[in-house]
């Protein structure tokens, strides 16, 4: 029904976080663009076929947004792997995946249309599920859902050289998450833990590294 689309590294400062990711993996993420109205901007790095890494932070060139910026970026003191997105598999719709998640006891939020202007001037569009505000536990092992439609997937047009090997995490109720992941068809390992945490193993020019 779905597959991992991208990993989200949230941070208070985009330049510093992008430099930290580049030092970890040995590849420089490329500028993505601003998210109008949300007060954020990103950089991007391909992790293989239809999967990528997003570094997101406040955009100081935008006015203060009406709602808190996404992913809790305003409350962080450094870059952190906070959540991930899944994209819709062929033959499914974003509504199908959302319905399956809700049936499994998790609501990823309302479906909304998004857009941004790339550095080359092209405006791109997509749909995703969105819940305003930060992440209550500082991270979320419940993915949000994205559908790119006719837009070229970012993994095809961002710097290459890294590959996603695995995603894993901890959660106070791992059995609940295992049911959710099975329902939407993604392979993410989750173990019991007192807090929510995520990590990803990546093959990179610097060897195999762990993103946290």
Image (spheres, rainbow, N blue to C red):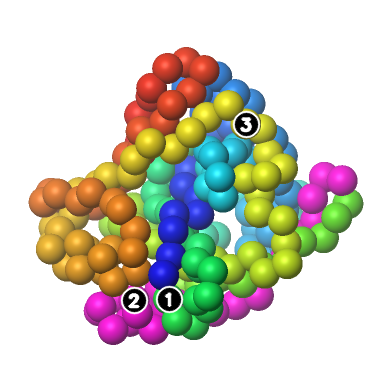
| Residue placed most toward the observer, 180 or 18 | 180
Kindly indicate whether the residue at mark 1 contacts the one at mark 2 (C-beta within 8 angstroms): yes
Span highlighted in magenta in the image? 98-120
Q: Which residue is mark 1?
A: 97
Picture residue at 82% right of the left edge, 45% below the top: 119
Q: Which residue is mark 3?
A: 160
Q: Which residue is mark 2?
A: 101
Picture residue at 50% right of the left edge, 66% below the top: 89
Mark 2 vs mark 3: which is more N-terminal? 2
Q: Position of residue 93 (x, y in %)?
A: 53, 78
Asked whether residue 174 appears in the rendered view, the answer is yes
Image quarter (top left, top right, bottom left or bottom right) of the N terminus: bottom left
Tell me if mark 1 has few (under 14), some (14-19) or many (20+) residues whose alpha carbon lies within 10 angstroms of its own: many
Picture residue at 25% right of the left edge, 79% below the top: 105
SS for dot 2: helix
| Residue placed most toward the observer, 113 or 20 | 113
SS for dot 1: helix
Q: Is residue 35 above or below residue 197?
A: below
Mark 3 vs mark 1: which is more N-terminal? 1
Q: CA distance from mark 2 to mark 3?
A: 31 Å
Q: CA distance from mark 2 to mark 1?
A: 6 Å
Asked whether, in this view, residue 125 is left or right of residue 137, the answer is: right
């Amino acid at each position: 029904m779905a597959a991992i689309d991208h990993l989200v590294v949230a941070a208070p400062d985009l330049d510093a976080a992008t430099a930290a990711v580049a030092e970890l993996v040995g590849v420089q993420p490329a500028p993505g663009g601003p998210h109008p109205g949300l007060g954020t901007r990103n950089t991007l790095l391909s992790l293989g076929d239809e999967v990528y890494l997003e570094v997101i932070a406040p955009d100081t060139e935008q006015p203060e947004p009406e709602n808190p910026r996404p992913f809790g970026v305003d409350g962080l003191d450094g870059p952190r792997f906070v959540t991930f997105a899944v994209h819709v598999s062929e033959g499914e719709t974003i509504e199908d995946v959302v319905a399956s998640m809700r049936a499994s006891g998790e609501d990823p939020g309302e479906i909304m249309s998004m857009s941004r202007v790339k550095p080359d001037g092209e405006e791109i569009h997509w749909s995703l599920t969105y819940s305003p505000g930060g992440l209550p536990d500082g991270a979320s092992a419940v993915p949000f859902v994205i559908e790119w439609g006719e837009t070229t997937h970012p993994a095809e047009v961002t710097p290459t050289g890294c590959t996603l090997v695995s995603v894993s995490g901890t959660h106070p109720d791992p059995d609940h998450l295992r049911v959710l992941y099975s329902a939407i068809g993604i392979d993410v390992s989750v173990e019991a833990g007192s807090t929510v945490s995520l990590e990803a193993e990546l093959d990179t020019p610097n060897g195999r590294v762990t993103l946290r």
